[in-house]
Image (spheres, rainbow, N blue to C red):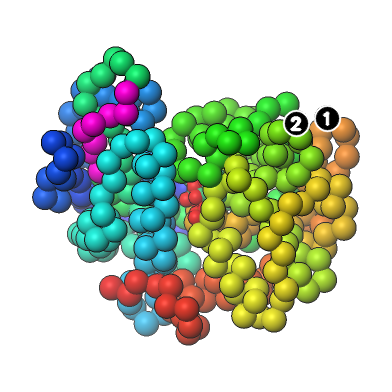
Amino acid sequence: MDWKKLTFDYSKANTMVYSHYKNGKWSPLESSNSDSMNINVMSGGLQYANEAFEGMKAYRGVDGKIRIFRPDENASRLKSSTDFLGIACPSEEMFMEACLRAVKENIEFIPPYKTRASMYIRPFVFGSNPQINLVCSDEATFIVVVTPIGNFTGTNFNPTRALLARDHDRAAPLGTGSYKIGANYAAAMLAGVKAKNEGYSAVLYLDSKEHKYIDEFGSSNFFAIRGNAYITPDSPSILPSITNKSLRQIAKDLGMSVENRKIPVEELRTFDEAGACGTALVITPIHEIHDRDLNISYKFGSPTEAGKNSIKLFKQLTGIHFGEIPDQHNWNLVI
Ligand code: PLP
Ligand code: COI
């Protein structure tokens, strides 16, 4: 494997781990050397997007140990997504066992420490029995796939531009935005690709009721820095990001104040730094948010270098990922 050439593309590892749910019970976890599976073409997952997923990472640390970052949080978020869909979910214990097994069986696919790359872990559940009626699937399949990955935006820690979306919304106010379900990503996929082709790293969505407040990006949360404050939106229609939750804690640990509240769009003018955060990209600094419809550009700091607080937060979080600094909140599952 040429670790230096890693991108955010899928490449097959040795095995995937899976289980089927039928008659109220999950089958024992099994591993397969293949990443294909026979699926009924009328399964709820394929027909009605009865599917929920998670994303987390395993890192090879400075001490050679493997660390998975906060998998318990992903287990409970998967439960919240599958509960919303009305489909079965593995217990936290089973989720952990499957993820650990997938990581251990594919350990050589975790990039070396010095590459600063990682292994992405993708647990997911989908309704698997054939159906044409609109009912919650009563059978399900749970799979954990792992793949070595590089940087999500391809920009490493370089500042990027984002496009503010006014021509479409990502999530309805009482809709699906706070759940990690495949359907949310299908709805925002083309808009994200078009924005990338125009040189933007992400699309920033507003609250879809009033279009007054900042929600989040298509696949990451939004944060900003003003003075010594870490400011991030509170909204019922955004995904509760585990990275953002961790950054809020790290900001407090670093003596910053944390504001988790509604952020009116106009407040963008007042921020010193802005960024996107999530598992895939960790932190991507944003130096400009372009509101094409209103022809306004909001600028933050330098277009070539991340701001000082974003750097501090990034170093602290990645230091914990790679075992370089004490994990004072016990976030890592060390293998
Ligand atoms: N928001 C959306 C829409 C996402 O897809 C993700 C990625 O998982 C995030 C935020 C960040 O969440 P997390 O930090 O838990 O990966
Ligand atoms: C993640 O950060 O894990 C994401 O959600 C990105 C993914 C949907 C590609």
Res. 200 visible in picture? no
**Magenta region, residue range:** 135-142
Q: Give the main secondary structure, helix, strand or loop, of the magenta stretch.
A: loop
Instruction: Please tell me whether residue 72 is drawn above or below residue 324 in the rendered image.
Output: above
- Residue type, numbered disc 2: Arg
Q: Is residue 133 left or right of residue 222?
A: left
Res. 238 visible in picture? yes
From mark 1 to mark 2, how far is it between C-alphas? 7 Å
Residue positioned 37% across, 63% down in the render:
72
Residue positioned 76% across, 36% down in the render:
211
Q: Nearer the viewer, residue 151 or 52?
A: 52
Q: Which mark is residue 166?
A: 2
- Tag 2's secondary structure? loop
Question: Disc 1 designates what residue?
Answer: 293
Q: Nearer the viewer, residue 170 or 290?
A: 170
- Residue type, numbered disc 1: Asp
Residue positioned 74% across, 52% down in the render:
262
Instruction: Please tell me whether residue 113 is drawn above or below residue 118 in the rendered image.
Output: below
Instruction: Please tell me whether residue 318 is drawn above or below residue 8 in the rendered image.
Output: below
Q: Give percent across and percent down for residue 322.
A: 45, 74
- Whether residue 140 is in magenta: the answer is yes
- Tag 1's secondary structure? loop
Q: Quadrant of residue 204?
A: top right
Q: Quadrant of residue 181?
A: top left
